[in-house]
Amino acid sequence: MGTRAQRGALAPGGVVGDGRYRLLAQFGIDERAGAHLWRARDGQLRRDVALTMLVGDPADPEAALLGRRTLERAAHAATFEHPGVARVLDVLSLGSGISSSEGLLGIVVAEWTKGTDLIDLVAERPVEPGAAARMVRALAESVDQAHQSGLVLGIDHPQRLRLTPDGRLRLAFPGPLPDATLRDDVKALGSVLYLLLTGRWALPGGPPALPPAPKSPTGRIVPAKSLQPRVPPELSALSVRTIEDGDHGGIRTSAAILRALDHAAEAAERAKQAQAEPAEPDGSVWTTKKPTKDKARRRKLALGVTALVCAAVAVLAWLGMMAINFFQDDGDTSGPPVNLADPPAQQQDGGQNNGNGQNNGNGNQQTQTGRPVQPSEITVYNPEGEGDSPSDAPKATDGDPATVWRTDLYKQQLPALKRGVGLLATFDESIDLSKVRVIADSPGTEVEIRTSDSPNAPLDATEVVGQGKLDDINTTISLDQPVDSTHVIVWVKTLGGEEPELNSEFGEVKFLPSA
Amino acid sequence: MPAPEGQPPRGPQARPTPPPLPPEPDATVYIPPRSARWPGIDPDVQGPYDELATQMMPRILDGPRHTEIGERLPAVGVDERAEPEAEPQPAAKKQSLAKATGRMAIATMTSRITGFLWKVLLAWVATLGVLYDSFTVANTMPLIINELLLGGVLTSVVVPLLVRSQDDPDGGESYTQRLITMAITILGIGTIASTAAAPWLTSLLMDDSGDANPQLATWFAYLLLPGLLFYGLFAVLSAVLNAKQIFGPAQWAPVVNNLVIIVTIIAFALVPGDPTIVPTTMTDPQVLVLGLGVLTAMTAQALFLVPALRRAGFRFKWNFGLDERLKEFGGLAAWILGYVVVSQIGMVINTRVLTAGAAGGASIYSNAWLLFQLPYGVIGVSLLTALMPKMSRAAADGDHRRLVGDLSYGSRLTTLMLLPVSAVMAVAGTSIGVALFALGKGSVEDAERLGQALAVSAFGLLPYALVMLQMRVFYAMKDSRTPTLIMVVMTVVKIPLLYLAQALLSPTHVVLGVMMVNSLVFVVGAVLGQVWLWVKLGNLRSKRVVGVILFTVVASVLGAAAAAAAGMLVPDFLGIIGGAWVTLILQGIVGMGVSFGVLMALKVDELAPVTRRVTRLLGRG
């Protein structure tokens, strides 16, 4: 077919009309007339125009005749002025403005209408009924005016219409079909209303982008109301009655549509007042939002969401921190014993690469003690009993206060069952102990620092060199005077907690030699 | 038969004339409100000399004007060539603009890279320990004070007026003189007062119950706070240059700053004495070299702009007095000032909690945060720079549909680009930390801690980028109140969570908790931003955004799983750092490859323009 063959020429950037109009973007095709709808740039007047280009084979006399008829009707329309119709600026026909090689039968040039495509408008969801009625009313006025002067506008294709920024429908691409009648315009009004309310096109020959209106088994169009429950019955009936050629009370003139629209608008207004809802602000005439969600309600909802999110995040944060603690503990106990930095005695270098740094503690550190000495072995010292998690003993010197060694749970305070339990630290070389620092969250616990000569010495063979109470998290037990020893016992004399649930725990134990 | 041809439009209904050709008369009046600067005012950027490059990004005054063509696809589809071919003149202009943007991108990248380099260098030389912590805290002080004194006012009032004043009869000369006079006065007083109050500032920012060393920080503060004068002056002068459409010097000045700091750090390493030992006096050579070097860098950064200013024909004269026009902006400035104050409060608490933890907290946090931001800085900012003029235009036209469209498009693209990155970051975080920070004297443990901090917070990358996008939309709509209120809520959530982290976590892990809290707070911010935009704009097409997020999450999870599996293949004999590098590269390639492969297999529409952009970029490069 000729039209297909020529389509390649109509691409953005191409020129038509003796090079005057440069094509910018295509806005649709009215397949019924082979009319391609384009936005173009008028190179002479440097303004944008809307082109309705009739594509066809000029050699086909019948097509040429039909094309001429459309152009004539468009030229008539050039005398018609109404805000609802884009003004026709020029009509180009074969031989006057178009050469036969362009594959075009004619072009209707109209002023460009800013705004939105109808298809885009209904793409997301149908238009709110009140706004739809207002939009169609503007178009119906121009149809009414045109009909009074005997003109057919040819609005029966959704892509020929555009919605202006002030919320009016406008015929943007004029050029009626050769056989279009006044009745077609009226039916088109009903169909546009149907489109806005439901997002479906009810007349034959609509663009493929729009789904056609569903039909009932009897071949009649399903009312808009049954597709979209929000549509008021007046509007639903109006659209169907206008589209159908039928018998019972069909609407056949634009004047009748205008009256019916006014009726429907009044009814909608009354319904709205009955619901006592605040009137919509003016700016939202044609927004696509649901009418029930007005600003105040949204704000309340937003405040609710705010509170909810804050709470959720607080919970998440807590869980996350628990997870960090959990994983880090895991990692520390299973991994090699790294000398991780801990709060009271801090080294710059994490103790990894500067093991001999004697004076690299910061200002917080007491000058009379040296760096804590790591015992070569730490075990549970339990001369009068068993248990008390011997396997967890290394957690007291692993550099992480969050990992703890814990005694069993006792029902009675010491020394009911036994005199006590403790941790025995063994040093390879004798340590000149001056202080022991215990980090533990175990208030009430009383400890003694004892020294011993052998790892398995009975309690009585050990010597008490200092004692303290672990009421704070961070307790430093100073020895009366430094003691030289290879075995140091941190002996729990009194358990923390209250009967019948008594136990003690050490997060971290540090042995500080005198400097 | 033909209608009048070539005849001027008749009657009162004559259609408006097409947009005039450039230079458009309203181009100088139109100010994309604070567009490029906002991501810079980030409460949590510490020591961000390099950030200024993006903060002061030029406002593209005569950028391509938004047209409806090609904006969204019309029913039949549109060819991209339409616009340039139809309007050849703007096309030429656009190209030169693209070239300028390209040059700017190089400068920005260079300053980012050098800025990052010196931070890493310092970590190698001085370790992520007490000294670096103290330096970091002291180094943020001039920034905080500058932000409070100038930051908000500069963006909200001074810069817009500066642009407008270019139309004055004297080309804005007297306004600029007044502005610089005012800035020097305020900054001078601020500098003297803050230097005198350095010990107090340190005690405000640092919690001395932890390992931090406030004494050392105070010494650094004495040395660095005088730089406030130059730091603030640099901000003002680059704004002046930008208003005169001179972008280069302000872009390259941070590079100068960074280079001076790098030289300083080399000197610091060469000074006799162990740099990891905490100095005991202020006159210790280490303290002096580092402090004075960075001060010099700040000075050099500001002075670098002076020749350019002279070449532009500007002569400075003391000129006291206020411009009448300043008064119009009162309301706007108040809210932005509120934003700045609130965000700085959040930052102070942040620093206090960090310094209450184990040593290295502040420096690890600052570097982790820098790494965290990096993907956003590269991908997010460049996307935003392309979108922002469009969105400002749409907002100025009151065209909410288009604004929502751009916002949704921007959110979707950001999601696609950043979620896979954050998945890889979460998996490879530790490797990143070790690969970058375990060199030199840096210890593997600290580097691992840094990497873990990065990993636990990686999920916040997308929310962070979304918050930045949303804030820009609010400001484009001339709403400075909502961002401030969102910031207030974020800070209100953040502070108790920070203290919770301090209470629950062991001192060594506080920094992980703080990073995670920050990310969570951005989740709050992103949800709030979306909700309040919905209040203002109606339907935001969030469904599509959520759809893309879900697709991308699936792809990213698969990518992360693949990356984790790939990480196990790395052999042990490479050593810690070598292994980290290999792991990082392998996981990066596998993770990103799988993520984007899955996304392509899922046929996510939004990916098409991105691949096109990338191929075009490659073609140009």
Image: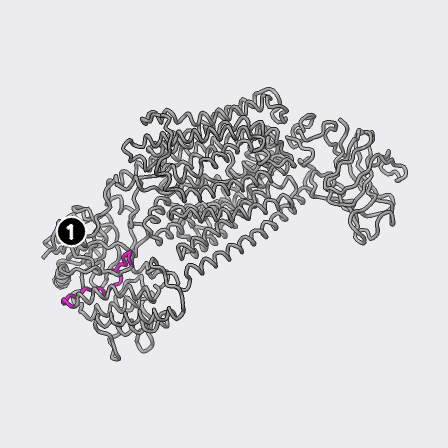
Please name whichever residue, A89 or A281, is drawn nearer the observer in this view of the structure.
A281
Verify whether residue A362 appears in magenta: no
Inspect the image, locate mark 1, and give the three-letter code of the amino acid beneath it: Pro
Residue A35 image offset from top left, x and y in percent: 21, 59
Residue A461 image offset from top left, x and y in percent: 90, 37
Q: Name the residue at 79% across, 31% down.
A: A433
Verify whether residue A162 appears in magenta: yes
Q: How many marks?
A: 1
Please name whichever residue, A148 or B72, is drawn nearer the observer in this view of the structure.
A148
Q: In the rendered view, would you say B578 is above or below A54?
A: above
Residue that carries the numbered disc 1 in the rendered image: B9
Please name whichever residue, A371 or A108, is drawn nearer the observer in this view of the structure.
A371
Does the image show residue B92?
A: yes
Q: Main secondary structure of the magenta part?
A: loop
Question: Farthest residue toward the right?
Answer: A460
Question: Farthest residue toward the top?
Answer: B272
From the viewer's perspective, tell me whether residue B72 is left or right of residue B39: left
From the viewer's perspective, tell me whether residue A476 is left or right of residue A28: right
Local packing at callout 1 (Cα closer than 10 Å; few below 14, some 14-19, many 20+) is some
Does the image show residue B251?
A: no
Locate the C terminus of chain B and report the quarter of the image it occupies.
Answer: top left
Q: Secondary structure at mark 1?
A: loop
- The colouring scheme, among rainbow, by chain, secondary structure or one colour, is one colour
Q: In the rendered view, would you say A46 is above or below A167?
A: above
Q: In the rendered view, would you say B284 is above or below B205?
A: above
Q: Chain of mark 1?
A: B
- Looking at the rendering, the stretch of residues picked out in magenta corresponds to A148-166
Locate the N terminus of chain B and report the quarter of the image it occupies.
Answer: bottom left
Residue B387, by quadrant, is top left
Residue B219 image offset from top left, x and y in percent: 58, 27
Residue A513 image offset from top left, x and y in percent: 77, 29
